[in-house]
Each structure stands twice: as structure tokens, then as C-alpha cells.
Amino acid sequence: MRYLSTVLLLYFAYLQNSTAQFVTIQDSSLIIRDTSQFVNSKLYDVVDLFQDINPFRKADTTSIQKTRSGISYLPNINYNPSIGFQIGLKAVGGVYLGDKKNTSMSIFATSVNYTTRGIFYAYLAHDTYTKDNKWNLKGNLVGAKMVGLDYGLGIGAPLDHPEADEVIMNNPERNRYVNHYNIYGFSERLYKQLLPGMFVGGGIFFELKRDIRTSSEFETSPNEIYGEWNNFNSTQNNNNGLMFNLQYLTRDNPNSAYKGIYTDVVLRMNQTWLGSQKSAYQLQTDFRKYWQLSEQRPNHVLAFWNYGSYNLGGTLFYLDLPGTGKDPYARSGRGYTNGYFKGISFFYSEMEYRFPILKNQFLSGVVFANVQTANDQMGTELFQQWQPAGGAGLRVLFNKMTRTNLCIDYAFGKFGQRGLFLGLNEAF
């Protein structure tokens, strides 16, 4: 079944719209830089593959190829241990709103999905850069019926002499709880460029969770205990507030960077006057660095990622606590299900080695390793305990206009956690 989903994803990629006025070129060969080994080598993606094998394709009568679009339409077939198998419709695209030399690519994605775990998820997201990068807008709109796996609070380290409620929260047996809830969310950030690559801005977010319930074989759940400890209504919650942001970037592409830096620092402030149950102040840091290891093979890259979320005051709702897969793009912690570890504060780092397999970049590979730590309300401190994971994967060049890759990863962690992770674009 896993292989069938990948084949279907590749097949329907051929059905891309070729007339939209997004990132386009007249000669789709995309000649690589003139090097001793790859003079006149051509990038080759999934659309090229299906054009070549299409038995109904008409022979070209001119030397000028049709304009290709930087927007991809496809069934969103996916799998990872957190959501099960997923089917849906997705569009991913990129557009330059100014000269490529001094304007970053603006990207967007929209999708409607359903999974075998009963999750229904629809979203619209964008990351927009105006001409000359004078302004940057990031935002998303979400509506979902969620089914989230829950393994308690903390990093999975045993406690000394725990009380009954602490045993449930720490969950040393790694019992699985399942949280069901509906979510409606909106956020928007606006950045102003101060210096080349440096932006400062602010934003607002609203996230409403309703009809929260937990199914398990146990009488009480970590969500209910945490609600009692911190005086939260455990059946519904508003996560509303303001953001202040500082961003610095020099990376050459948001989908698959070869070189450069991406840094985003966000102060999130849950505010009761905007509807949150409690005020809370969380500092989020996102740092990514890319080293290009070869000019001849540009996709030969070493990449580093660090993501952190640190409590500066106040109290977050249980389902809003930072943890595995709780980064803005839900890509951290390959090897574990989303939310497997969570804490009041959370720290995550990952290193990935990306290497070419075919000189036309149609096929490449990765190996990666990550580590995470979290604190809790039972005495475990941040950086006291660590949990590792690692894996390897293949990359299929899906759209050479935007460097969009189909990512096929297998990752494994501790406590028997392992699984196949499929998706578009790199994890970071």
C-alpha cells in the first residue's frame, strides 16, 4: 500500500496546470552551471518523466518548449504514523513578485485532506515577499477535525517517587491516549525589511479548539489532569494573542535550500483580553543553516536545524504545549508521532546530509539524525534528558521550477517508534 501511494502520487503529478502565470521559463532544460563534469546537463523532474513515457505524446515540431508552470496540482497522498494514510487534494506553488536577484520566492499551499485516523484537515497558507523584499507576509487559515495521539507530558524519563497523577502524566509505560477535537485557526504576520535579509514585524493569531475529548482504556487522561493542575477547562480552549517577530534569511530557496541561513524569532503572547483562558508568553526560535558541499553537484548539501519554544511566563493549554512535530510546518521529530514528547519548554536539533544520486537531480538521497528535550511540571528540567531519532530517505525531483521534491523517508526512534514519512518539500 505504501508503494502504491507513491506511484499514484507520481502519476497524478503529470496533471499539472501548464498555463498559470507563476515561475516560468521558455527553455525548461535549466542548464546547470558550466562545470567540467556536467556541461549541458539538464534538470529532470516528474513531469519530464511522464512526457517521455506518454505513448500519446506528439512529436515536437519546434525547438521551443512550452512554458512550464511553477504550480503543482496533485492528490495529496501521504503517510506517517501520526495521521495514518491520507488522501486529499493539494496545490503547491511559487511566484516571484520582483526581480529574482533581490526578491525571494513567494510560496503558497492549499489542501483538503482526510486520513484513516478520522482526521479532516483543510488549510490555506502563504509566505509572500513583495518587490525587492520590502515586505514579507506569512499567514494561514485552518479548519480541522483532529484526532491526535497523546503520550503524556515530558520527555519520557522515569520519575523518582511519583504520585498517582504524575505517573499518568509521565506515562512511563508509554500508554497511548487519543484526543479528539475541532480546530478553527487564523494567523497573519507582517514583516518590514530593515536591512538586506533582515525583517522585523508583528502579527495576530486566533485558534479555537472545541469538543475536546479523550478516548482511552483509562479513567482519566493527561489533558484532564493538566487542566486540574492549572485550572483550565479541558473540553474547549481559545489560543488567541499577539506576535512580535524578527527574521533574517539568506537561503537561496525555501523549498530545498542549497546554501544560506534562515532565522525566525517569535514572541507569542496569549492574551485574556483577546479570549485566551490564561495569559502566556512563549519565545520561539527557528534557525536553519545550509552548506553547499560542491559547486558541480549543487544539491550536495549539509543542513542543520534548531527549533526551540521557551516559556517566559504564564501557562499554555495542554494541547498547545510545544513538542514533537509542533513546529509551524509539523516536520520536526521524524521517527516519532506528532506530540510524542511535549513540555512547558522544548528544544530540538537535527542534522541532515543531502547527496545527489543522478546528475540530472531527478533522484537524490538523505540521511538524518535528530535529538529533542523538554521539561515538565514533575521536576524534569530542560536539557536534563534527551531522546534521539534518525533515518534515511530518497528524493524525487517533483517540480524543477521551484525545487519541489517528493520526500520518502523511513525514520526510527526509541520506545519502538518508527515509520514511513511521505511529503512534498524538505523537512527544513
Image (cartoon, grey):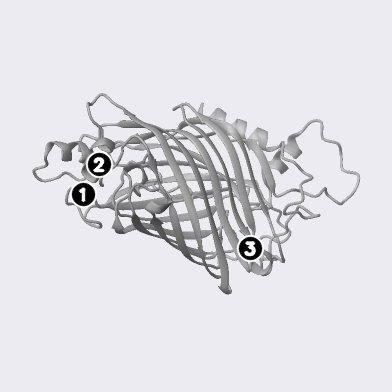
Which mark, by number, is residue 335? none
Q: Residues within 10 Å of mark 2 (few under 14, many from 20)?
A: many
Q: Residues within 10 Å of mark 3 (few under 14, many from 20)?
A: many
> Comparing marks 3 and 2, which lies closer to the viewer?
2
State the separation of the CA atoms marked 3 and 1: 42 Å
Q: Is residue 186 visible?
A: yes
User: For the residue marked with disc 2, what is the amino acid?
Assistant: Tyr
- Residue in the foreground of this view, choosing between 341 and 409: 341
- Quadrant of res 102: bottom right
Mark 3 lies on a secondary structure that is loop
Q: Residues within 10 Å of mark 1 (few under 14, many from 20)?
A: some
Q: Is residue 171 visible?
A: no
> Comparing marks 2 and 1, which lies closer to the viewer?
2
State the separation of the CA atoms marked 2 and 1: 9 Å
Name the residue: 56% across, 59% down: 257
State the separation of the CA atoms marked 3 and 2: 43 Å
Q: Which residue is mark 1?
A: 377
Q: Which residue is mark 2?
A: 226
Name the residue: 36% across, 41% down: 336
Residue with the most extreme front position = 273
User: For the residue marked with disc 3, what is the amino acid?
Assistant: Ser
- Tell me where residue 66 appears, x and y as whole percent: 82, 48
- Tell me where residue 125 appears, x and y as whole percent: 57, 48
- Residue in the foreground of this view, choosing between 358 and 370: 370
Marks 2 and 1: CB-CB under 8 Å? yes
Q: Is residue 277 above or below residue 101?
A: above
- Tell me where residue 331 appears, x and y as whole percent: 45, 47
Q: Which residue is mark 3?
A: 104
